[in-house]
C-alpha cells in the first residue's frame, strides 16, 4: 500500500488518539463556535497510512505521543524553515529486525564493491538524465548515452560532472525565460522548486534505507562528517531526474513570476513525488515503493546475494 504524504502549512495542533493522527485548528479551538462545530472540524488520519509528514509552520504543535507513533511506523518527519525549505529530518532509530547484521555488512563492504555500486549509480543517473532530455526537450543525447556506457568503477573519470554540465545547460533550454540557467541551491528559479523536490525525495530515500536496516550515514561514495544522510544522497542520484521532469512540467505553462516564490500550490504539486509512477525491473510502482525495492537490493549487494542495485528506468 502506498503511504500518504501530509503537509501542514497553517497553525495546527497534532496529537494521537486510537492510533490516529488528530488534527485540530487553533483558530477553531479558541473561537466561540458551538462544541458540535468544533468537533466536526477535527480531522483524523490512521498513522499506519502515513509515510511522510512535512511541518511547514512555526505555530504547529506536535505531541510526543504522535511523534513516537509516527517513528514506530517508519514515517519520515520533515521540518521547514521560514522560507518553507526543509531543514530537518527525523527517522526511526531501529527500522528493521536485522538491523545490526545489516549494519555490519554495510560497514565491512570493501572499497572495490563500493566503487562498483557507485559506477552502477552514476550509469543509472546519466541514463535517466538522457531520457529526460530526450522526452521533454528533444535534445541530442548521444553524448549522454556514451558517457553512461563509459562510466568506470568509482566514476574515475568524473563523467557524472561532465554529464551534469551538459544536462543543466539543456534541460530548460527551450524556455526563453530560463536561458543561461545554472543549477545551484541559491540560484534563480526554478532552483527553489528543485531544492524542495530533492528534499522530499531525500526523505523518501532515507526512510526506505532505514526500513531496510541500513545506516543512512555511511555512504558508498559521499563522505561528509557533517552529513547524517550520505547513503541517502548516494542512492537518490538516479531518482533526481524524476523530480527534474516534474519541475519542468510545472513551469512549462507558467510565467516565471508564478514560480519565483514557493507557493502552497507549487508545494502541493511537489508533494506528489512519492506517488510518481516509476519502473523497476520491468514493473511499475509508485516511487516510494520503488525506493524500498532499491534499498532491499542494496542490502543484498552488501550480503553478496546480488551484484546490481535495482534502480528505476525512465521509459
Image (spheres, grey):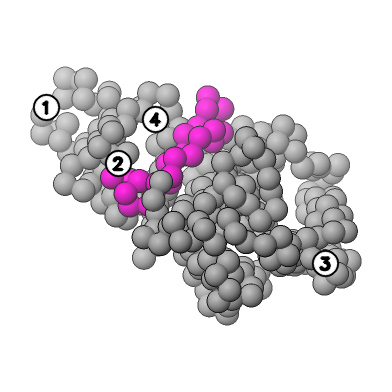
Magenta span: 68-92
Residue that badge 1 annotates = 34
Question: Quadrant where the C terminus lies?
Answer: bottom right
Which mark is nearer the camera, 4 or 2? 2
Residue lying at 32% horizontally and 55% vertically, measured from the top left: 49
First reached walking from the N terminus: tag 4 or tag 1: 4
Helix, strand, or loop for circle 1? loop
Question: Cβ–Cβ below 8 Å for labels 1 and 2?
Answer: no
First reached walking from the N terminus: tag 1 or tag 2: 1
Residue lying at 86% horizontally and 42% vertically, measured from the top left: 180
Helix, strand, or loop for circle 4? loop
Which mark is nearer the camera, 1 or 2? 2
Residue that badge 4 annotates = 10
Residue closer to the observer: 26 or 226: 226
Q: Residue furthest bottom?
A: 282
Residue 291 visible in the picture: no
Measured Cα–Cα span from mark 4 to mark 1: 22 Å
Residue closer to the observer: 243 or 30: 243
Q: Is residue 305 left or right of residue 3?
A: right
Which mark is nearer the camera, 3 or 4? 3
Sort mark 1 into few (<14), some (14-19) or many (20+) by Cα contacts within 10 Å. few
Q: Position of residue 71 (x, y in %)?
A: 35, 46
Q: Which mark is residue 68?
A: 2
Residue 235 visible in the picture: yes
Q: Is residue 64 magenta?
A: no
Q: Relative to 219, does residue 154 appear above or below in the rendering? A: below
Residue that badge 3 annotates = 152
First reached walking from the N terminus: tag 3 or tag 4: 4
Q: Is residue 77 magenta?
A: yes
Amino acid at each position: 500500500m502506498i503511504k500518504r504524504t501530509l503537509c501542514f502549512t497553517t497553525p495546527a495542533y497534532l496529537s494521537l488518539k486510537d492510533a490516529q493522527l488528530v488534527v485540530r485548528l487553533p483558530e477553531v479551538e479558541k473561537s466561540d463556535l458551538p462544541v458540535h462545530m468544533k468537533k466536526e472540524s477535527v480531522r483524523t488520519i490512521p498513522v499506519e497510512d502515513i509515510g511522510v509528514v512535512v511541518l511547514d509552520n512555526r505555530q504547529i504543535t506536535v505531541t510526543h505521543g504522535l511523534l513516537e507513533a509516527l517513528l514506530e511506523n517508519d514515517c519520515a518527519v520533515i521540518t521547514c524553515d521560514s522560507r518553507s525549505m526543509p531543514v530537518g529530518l527525523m527517522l526511526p532509530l531501529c527500522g528493521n529486525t536485522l538491523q545490526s547484521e545489516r549494519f555490519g555488512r554495510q560497514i565491512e563492504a570493501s572499497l572495490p564493491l563500493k566503487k562498483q555500486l557507485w559506477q552502477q549509480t552514476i550509469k543509472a543517473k546519466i541514463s535517466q538524465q538522457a531520457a529526460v532530455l530526450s522526452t521533454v526537450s528533444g535534445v541530442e543525447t548521444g553524448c549522454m548515452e556514451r558517457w553512461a556506457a563509459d562510466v568506470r568503477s568509482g566514476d574515475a573519470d568524473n563523467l557524472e560532472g561532465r554529464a551534469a554540465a551538459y544536462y543543466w545547460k539543456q534541460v530548460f533550454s527551450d524556455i526563453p525565460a530560463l536561458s543561461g540557467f545554472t543549477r545551484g541551491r541559491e540560484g534563480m528559479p526554478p532552483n527553489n522548486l528543485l531544492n524542495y523536490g530533492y528534499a522530499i525525495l531525500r526523505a523518501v530515500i532515507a526512510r526506505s534505507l532505514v526500513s531496510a536496516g541500513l545506516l543512512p550515514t555511511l555512504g558508498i561514495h559521499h563522505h561528509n562528517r557533517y552529513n547524517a544522510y550520505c547513503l541517502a544522497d548516494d542512492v537518490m542520484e538516479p531518482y533526481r531526474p524524476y523530480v527534474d521532469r516534474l519541475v519542468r512540467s510545472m513551469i512549462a505553462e507558467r510565467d516565471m513570476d508564478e514560480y519565483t516564490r514557493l507557493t502552497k500550490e507549487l508545494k502541493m504539486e511537489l508533494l506528489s513525488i512519492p506517488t510518481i509512477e516509476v519502473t523497476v525491473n520491468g514493473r511499475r510502482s509508485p516511487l516510494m515503493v520503488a525506493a524500498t525495492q532499491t534499498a532491499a537490493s542494496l542490502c543484498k549487494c552488501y550480503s553478496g546475494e546480488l551484484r546490481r542495485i535495482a534502480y528505476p528506468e525512465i521509459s
